[in-house]
Image: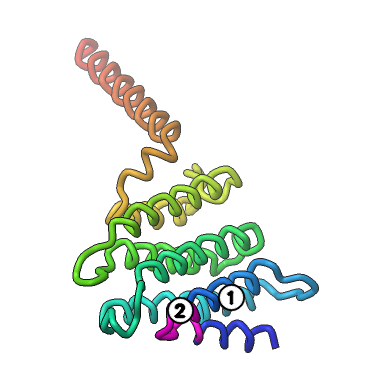
Amino acid sequence: MWLKLVQALKKLTLDQREEVRNHAMSSLQKCLLEVDGICLLPSSWLHSFDIVIFMMLDDLIEIAQSQSQKDYRNMEGTLMHAVKLLSKAFLHLLQELSGLSSFCKLWLGVLSRMEKYLKVKVRGKRSEKIQELVPELLKNILLVMKSKGILAKRSTIGGDSLWELTWLHLNNFAPSLQSEVFTGELELDSSNHTQSDGSHSAVVEESSQSG
């Protein structure tokens, strides 16, 4: 029943009328973030991301780029509302979903939509408001993931996959975020490389002298 409700609201977020879209978006957000008395399995939440949140974001971008502004007024505001909803829903469920084997796929899905929204054109040009909003949302998500130890550069073999995939994707469209959020880690890496290079030079020099 709950899934049918959020799917119905998702359809209304695509309505031509701005007030209907925005009201449906607010209602959808409440259904996703204020679920009292309903116990959903993590797999059900993942399914909801795929068929409700991600699909809504993709459909809204298509509307914004292909439909007339006369038919769909203020799509910029709706797109901003939608990407905020994505961020809030992801953070709300982060702790619960981060332990799943499919979390990496979910996270890459979030990054992919953030990139699309950053590059979307409204009325033939990129939206300054959306270009300001998306990096702010991403930075906040990264800070939370960092504080919870979900996104960290680990020394264990194979433990870097989420870290590496994150920056492989983000460096294509928001390269400054790594230095803004993980300054300490990058400085430590740089220091370790410098020490390693120094040790290597000393060994080479000692070897040449003994020879």
Q: How far apart are marks 1 and 2 (CA)?
A: 11 Å
In the rendered image, the vertical position of residue 142 relative to residue 165, given as above or below? above
Regarding residue 99, the answer to whether it shows in the image is no
For the residue labelled by badge 2, is the local secondary structure a helix, a strand or a loop? helix
Nearest the camera: 42 or 2? 2
In the rendered image, the vertical position of residue 175 relative to residue 72, given as above or below? above
Q: Which residue is drawn at 48% across and 63% down?
A: 107
| Coordinates of residue 209 in the picture (x, y in percent) | 21, 10
Determine whether label 1 and label 2 are within 8 Å by CB: yes
| Coordinates of residue 92 in the picture (x, y in percent) | 62, 60
Quarter of the image for the N terminus: give it: bottom right
Q: Residue at x 42, y 50 (%)?
A: 136
Can you tell which mark lies on residue 56? 2
Q: Pointer 1: what residue?
A: 28
Quarter of the image for the C terminus: give it: top left
| The quarter of the displayed image where residue 91 is located | bottom right
Q: Which residue is drawn at 50% across and 75% down?
A: 53
Chain-order first, disc 1 or disc 2: 1
For the residue labelled by badge 1, is the local secondary structure a helix, a strand or a loop? helix
Q: Which amino acid does label 2 sit on?
A: Met
Q: Give the range drawn in magenta.
A: 12-20
Q: Residue at x 64, y 70 (%)?
A: 30
| Coordinates of residue 88 in the picture (x, y in percent) | 55, 61
In the rendered image, the vertical position of residue 164 relative to residue 67, given as above or below? above
Q: Which amino acid does label 1 sit on?
A: Leu
